[in-house]
Image: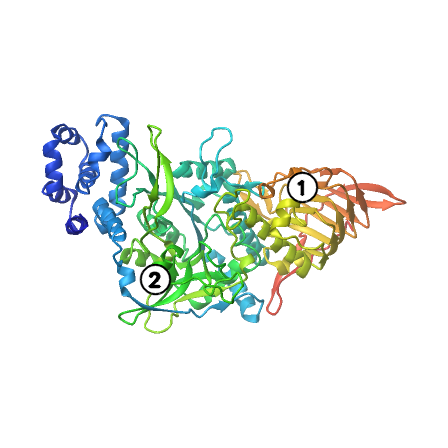
Amino acid sequence: MRAQLKFLSEPLRSAASEEERLLILNAFPTVMEFLRRSPSFHMGLAKATLSEQVACKQVIAIGQMERLSSGGDLSSAAFKKFLETMTVLDSFYKEIGGIVGYQEKILSFLEGNLDERQSEIVQFHTPDFIDIAQESPDVLQWIEEGIRSLPRMAEMYPLGGAADRLHLVDESTGLELPAAKLAYGGRPLFEGLIRDLQAREFLYFKLYGRQIEIPIAIMTSEEKDNHRHILRICESHQWFGRSKESFQIFSQPLVPSVDTQGNWCLLGAFTLLLKPGGHGALWKRALDSGAFQWLVSQGKELALVRQINNPVAGLDYGLLTFFGLGVNRRAVFGFASCPRIVQAAEGVNVVVEKKNGDLALTNIEYCDFEKYGIVDLPLKEGEPYSRFSSNTNILFADLRAVERAVKICPFPGLLANFKEASYTSFCGKVHRTKMARLESTMQNIADVFVEKQKPQSTFVTYNHRHKTIATAKKAFVPGGALRETPEECFYMQLQAARELLEVRCGFSLPEKYSLEKYLEAGPDVAFLYHPALGPLYALIAQKISCGNLALGSEVEVEIVDLEIKNLNLSGSLAIRSEQPLGALDAARRLVYSDQTGRCVLRGVTVRNRGVDWGKSAPFWKGAWVRKESLQIDLKGCSEFIAQDVCFEGNQHFEVPDGISLVVSEKKGRLIFEEKPFVSKPFWLYRWEETRGVIAQRGEDKNT
């Protein structure tokens, strides 16, 4: 069968028109025989459009229509939807021969044939990693270049994945939800991507006095109603204070899942089990949808690519250094890498040498290790880290170079990863089998960027793992593995925040909990903050310095204009600004400015009963139950100032817009004084070549 399909796919791929493709299919013996035996089907199909006929007859040609049409009605909504789906599928895979080409590739993988990529590779080499784990003079230069070059940048988010292992369900409807809806830390994962982006934009504003709005290209899918959910999140958040026009949202096609015989998995007549075809679809869909042209028309030359299930990627200087290094090198493509845990479901970065002598810095997916003879062993016996570094799906891309590359290789890194799975058909029958679909990997567009000597136009950085990747990929089952669960991911995020407080901010903290102890008793300490507080740790350390947190204490600072010195906390402290970055204008656009909420705590002690961690699991959801807390809510442009004060028990301060509330203490009694809020810069930022971003307090007449 495969040989016949390969023979058929070539003329289908090179045909000049749909009419020519239809003639080719009509002459194919399998199609002729099926239509001869099913004259009613032939007559019904004649009512379809030309493109629908071409797509449908390809399904006949690959031998799947007999099963699909069993008990089906050509006048049904299911058949109309089937034709629509197949037409989209055929168009997307036109470069490899449409639906026939899709099936031929699947059968090739099933037969164990070497794919084109595999047959070209002679050997692997270790890349020249660029270490950015320490703040060296080079790293500072790349941070500055990264910030300064933000106006040239776009961001791209492949958000169309199935995320089946998260088992995320809407509690009110029982319907499955995409990863973008995961309520991580009290807000959807998708919102976290936008907050990280705005933190970098705000940093640029504070240094250069100009607001920029980085455009975002998002690839969704119809899986779990992903596309609609993304739109609803954007709409419900009023596009996050950004212009609606700064978003370009396009959907990737869903593709048929197949069993180990190459048969398509069916839910019912004319209804397939469809799944996304991998994040590699990002590039071709960006080309087909006009997203590349849209970005370039706005003067955007470069892109940073992030996935949704890695919320720690924006910590500290990692992304800015990565981007700045790419700019500095005038690179066409780049990978962000870090240590990799043995047996982690993460690809690895390697330099491949091809038979013709070409070299390419690229990625090998973890599911292809066996195919390429890669044995995943520890770097050192008994240690958790692999001898291979992790490809983190954080990518740097020159947009014009990638656009050209897509025309050469529209489906990079094609693979079929068969896994044990189950699904339930419409008749209620449960099918358990190994399943796969043809997937493409976005990192492997780098295969196109070949050089004769060691790669110069591509690069790979190496950073601390806990500041580069911690993924929320699958639901935690008590007693099961913790790796890649939201529980582990949030623990890693809290540990990174703990390191920030302890190492950079000079805080005294209780003994660190293990992951297992954390799950049992709650966090040793929890520090959550708005990413625009930095995001650079060196900047945050200038705003928060010295203090002590007791075991189980929680600090939440949803604020940017903040100064904390010598804080002693036992319990819960939450400081929230209604306008952390500035105010909304009449069009509901966020204008970065000094029109913010501010807070100053110097020599402050806070004692209360804090969070009831026993009632707050799972901790990663952020739905914490507080027995008592000091909560400071700043409305509009307002300010809260406290010095040498002790706050005990449950206290809540809401400071109205236009008010500066000054709290002092005399003979053990709190004294409150309201003053008019004076609008002025709170922190003034400047760049120093040897120190990075320096934050200096503006004149403060209220203290």
Viewer-proximal residue, 314 or 309? 309
Q: Position of residue 419 (x, y in %)?
A: 37, 47
The image shows residue 371, relative to residue 588, as above or below, that is below
- The answer to whether residue 684 is seen in the rendering is no
- Expressed as whole percent of the image width and height from the top left, the position of residue 546 reads 74, 57
Task: Give above or below for 398 relative to 40.
Answer: below
- What residue appears at the point 44 percent right and 35 percent down from the top-left corner? 176
Residue ranking furthest to the bottom? 453
Name the residue beneath numbered marker 2. 372
On screen, residue 26 above or below 95: above
**Image point 21% across, 49% down: which residue?**
97
- Judging depth in this view, the residue of 291 and 483 nearest the camera is 483
Q: Secondary structure at mark 2?
A: helix
Tell which circle, 1 or 2, labels the residue nearer the N-terminal end: 2
In which quarter of the view is residue 140 placed? bottom right
Label 2 Cα crowd, 10 Å radius (few <14 / some 14-19 / many 20+)? some
- Amino acid type of the residue that numbered disc 1 sits on in the rendered structure: Trp
Foreground: disc 1 or disc 2: 2
Alpha-carbon span between mark 1 and mark 2: 47 Å
Answer whether residue 506 is visible to the viewer in this image.
yes
**Where's residue 33, x and y in %?**
10, 37
* Total marks placed: 2
Residue occupying image coordinates x 68% and y 47%: 555
* Residue 183 placement, left or right of 81: right
Mark drawn on residue 613: 1
- Residue flagged by tag 2: what amino acid is it? Tyr
Q: Position of residue 369 (x, y in %)?
A: 38, 59
